Image (cartoon, helix red, strand yellow):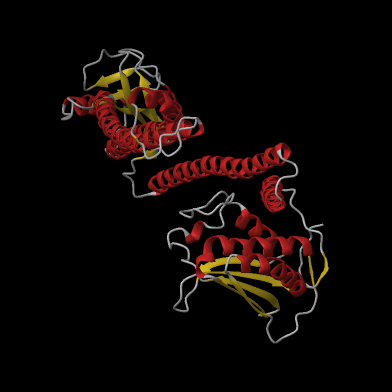
Amino acid sequence: MNRDAGVHFAPRGIRNTLRIRGLRQRWLISAALPVVVLVMAAVGVFTIASAQYYYDSMLSGLETRARVEADTFTGYGVRSYSEYYRLASYSVETFEEKDVLELQFINTNGRVQASSYGLTAGSSPGTSDIERAIGGEMSFFRGEDPQTGENILAVSCPLRFGRRIMGVLRYVTSLRAVEHQVLINFLIASGLALAVVALILISNVLFINSVVEPVAVVSDAARRISGGSYGIRVDNHYKDELGELVDNINDMSLKISQAERIQQEFISSVSHELRTPLTAINGWAETLEVDPVGKPEQTRRGLAIIGKESRRLTSMVEELLDFTKIQDGRFTLRIGTVDLVSELEDTIYTYRELFRQEGIEVSYDPGEEDVPPIAADGERMKQVFSNVLDNARKHGGAGKRIDVSVCTEEDCVVIRVRDYGPGIPADELPFVKQKFYKGSSKARGSGIGLAVCDEIVRLHGGSFDVSNANDGHSGAVVRISVPMSVGNEAE
């Protein structure tokens, strides 16, 4: 399996471009496209509103002017059609705004009588505003002039003389200037909109690149980790959530690398641990087979070694089976009423003679309070005691002393096992209960005993803690706390 422990990983341009294309497309659809649509809609609304403002302002001005002019015209007291015609002709001849506005007088038949533009008398504009004005209502027309084809705005006001409508006063102006101004406004608004869209797109492209490129790097790193390149690290240049994501990926990679290394070391260690007793068993078995009688002393020694190594193999196999059950979730308890102190004392009695032969003194303090029987799995708890005592012998036996004590603390039975060996290095202390972990210790073992003990105590609702002694002496302390009333549902 390929492992790149400690390797730093940098972006790969071509692959990342392909990898982040989907994110950019989704960003364009979900973020950029709505912004563009909104800006375009805003430009359209602005253009329509500005055009309507210009048209309404022009119409209001023409209507006011037509009304005032019509009132002034009828105020002259015209009595005959000839007087009306002379006054109309005089008005168009003296009209001063011929360059921007046309003044027309139209008869009741809808034909031009006089015009400041000099239109041929008798021509008919044919627009709807004239018909409504002849009917007595001021009206306007905006659209294409039927005669010239030009877009115009016209306001027609009836000229009343008494109760009779003598004609129509009509103002006409071209919309070319207004349309030109509306076009300029549209172009300005479009230019501003394009600038805004460009700014938004550029800023968002920079942002999306700052997001998707690191994501692509992290994704590629995760792919490589899943492919077996444990231990690779992504360079972290970020201070936000991306930085936290990169830190998590790096931490995951490191932990997987450590777990892989520990597992490999465990396999190597277990292979060695199994090979050693098997070699001793096979060697003595062959010796006894060749010389079945031999010397009684040699025979007893050989059988003792075979028995000892067989028990060690059995213990290792049981630990492995228990660990497998823990991993599969099949590790359960058989809860019953148990005298926990009696189980502890039986375990101490079993190990005391063995420890004495190795020069290790076991001191036991049962405490002053009587500990009542509790609900627990006696066999599993005895397994914990045996493992802890054996662990103290292997790692702390150099101190030639092991202290065991029992007491009650806050409705819990607390067992402490303390050795006087070198203790546990501070940097290894947080990991001693992890599976396969053996640290710098050279003692034999699979590295899963404490992990099994921790799981057993946890299933009892208790706690299993390992620490160094703080009483001025070296050594390690194991504290086992089990509630007197176990609320565990395990069967």
Q: Where is residue 84 drawn, in percent x and y?
A: 28, 28
Q: Nearer the viewer, residue 294 or 276?
A: 294
Judged left or right of residue 66, residue 356 is: right
Q: Nearer the viewer, residue 143 or 204?
A: 204
User: Does the rendering let one see residue 55?
Assistant: no
Residue at 71%, 36% in the rendered image: 290
Give the number of callouts. Answer: 0
Judged left or right of residue 43, residue 444 is: right
Report which quarter residue 464 is drawn in: bottom right
Judged left or right of residue 391, residue 8 is: left
**Residue placed farthest to the right in the image?**
336
**Residue placed farthest to the bottom in the image?**
368
Is residue 130 placed above or below 210 in the rendered structure?
above
Is residue 176 placed above or below 275 in the rendered structure?
above
Q: Where is residue 402 drawn, in percent x and y?
A: 58, 72
Judged left or right of residue 90, residue 250 is: right
Q: Nearer the viewer, residue 383 or 430?
A: 383
Residue at 51%, 40% in the rendered image: 260
The C terminus: image quadrant: bottom right
Q: Where is residue 131 drawn, in percent x and y?
A: 43, 23
User: Does the rendering let one see residue 202?
Assistant: yes
Q: Where is residue 72 drawn, in percent x and y?
A: 27, 39
Q: Nearer the viewer, residue 85 or 321?
A: 321
Report which quarter residue 463 is drawn in: bottom right
Residue at 45%, 41% in the rendered image: 253
